[in-house]
């Protein structure tokens, strides 16, 4: 028996609107906001699937669901997550202009040109302009 690629990333955030702004408006993840499954028979009190959140599922290639939930007492911290970009310099300028803290500016790495930023809860978010479209 084997386990495949990850299919789910959930972050519990201190301020949902602030995190939606960071990931949706600045990073460009097309999150759908104000979703609440509490009354839909999805496990009402389950902190992972009930309550206000923003989410998006990539279905091209391998499936991956990414969600931000308003914290119910625990905030996700110390995580590193990465996204591809086709214009790292443009994204870097946009993020810095918006007051986002850059952990490091764009630099060459073996996997592609990469920069890292702090999300509103202090997680590390890398953006990578990949080599050869990978």
Image (spheres, rainbow, N blue to C red):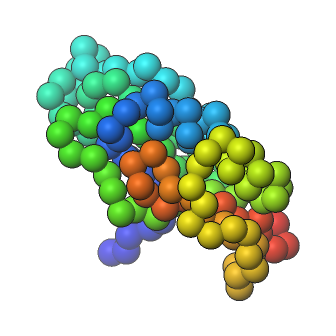
Which of these two is toward me, 82 or 5?
A: 82
Could you tell whether 93 is left or right of 117 in the image? right
Q: For the image shown, how many numbered marks are present on the structure?
A: 0
Q: In this rendering, does residue 8 appear at all?
A: no
Based on the displayed image, in which of its 4 quarters is residue 86 positioned?
A: bottom right
Query: Which quadrant does the N terminus fall into?
Result: bottom left
Relative to residue 1, is residue 120 depicted above or below?
above
Relative to residue 29, is residue 50 depicted above or below?
above
Q: In this rendering, does residue 44 appear at all?
A: yes
Could you tell whether 46 is left or right of 92 in the image? left
> Which residue is rendered at x = 35% and y = 41% of the image?
13
> Which residue is rendered at x = 32% and y = 32% of the image?
70
Relative to residue 42, is residue 95 depicted above or below?
below
Query: Which quadrant does the C terminus fall into?
Result: bottom right
Q: Going by the picture, which residue comes out furthest to the top?
A: 39
Residue 123, x across and y down, in percent: 43, 57
Could you tell whether 16 is left or right of 88 in the image? left
Residue 106, x across and y down, in percent: 73, 69
Could you tell whether 37 is left or right of 132 in the image? left
Q: Going by the picture, which residue comes out furthest to the bottom?
A: 110
> Which residue is rendered at x = 56% and y = 66% of the image?
103
Q: Going by the picture, which residue comes out furthest to the left?
A: 45
> Which residue is rendered at x = 17% and y = 40% of the image?
73
Based on the displayed image, in which of its 4 quarters is residue 21 positioned?
A: top right
Residue 90, x across and y down, in percent: 82, 52
Which of these two is toward me, 119 or 64?
A: 119
Residue 89, x across and y down, in percent: 81, 59
């Amino acid at each position: 028996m084997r386990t495949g690629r990850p299919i789910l990333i959930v972050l519990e955030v201190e301020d949902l609107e602030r995190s939606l702004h960071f990931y949706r408006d600045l990073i460009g993840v097309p999150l759908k906001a104000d979703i609440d499954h509490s009354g839909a028979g999805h496990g009402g009190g389950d902190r992972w699937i009930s309550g206000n959140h923003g989410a998006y599922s990539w279905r091209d290639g391998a499936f991956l669901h990414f969600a931000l939930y308003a914290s119910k007492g625990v905030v996700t911290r110390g995580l590193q997550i990465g996204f591809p970009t086709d214009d790292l310099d443009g994204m870097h300028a946009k993020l810095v202009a918006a007051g986002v803290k850059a952990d490091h500016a764009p630099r060459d790495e073996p996997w592609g040109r990469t920069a890292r930023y702090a999300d509103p809860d202090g997680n590390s978010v890398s953006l990578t302009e990949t080599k050869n479209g990978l």
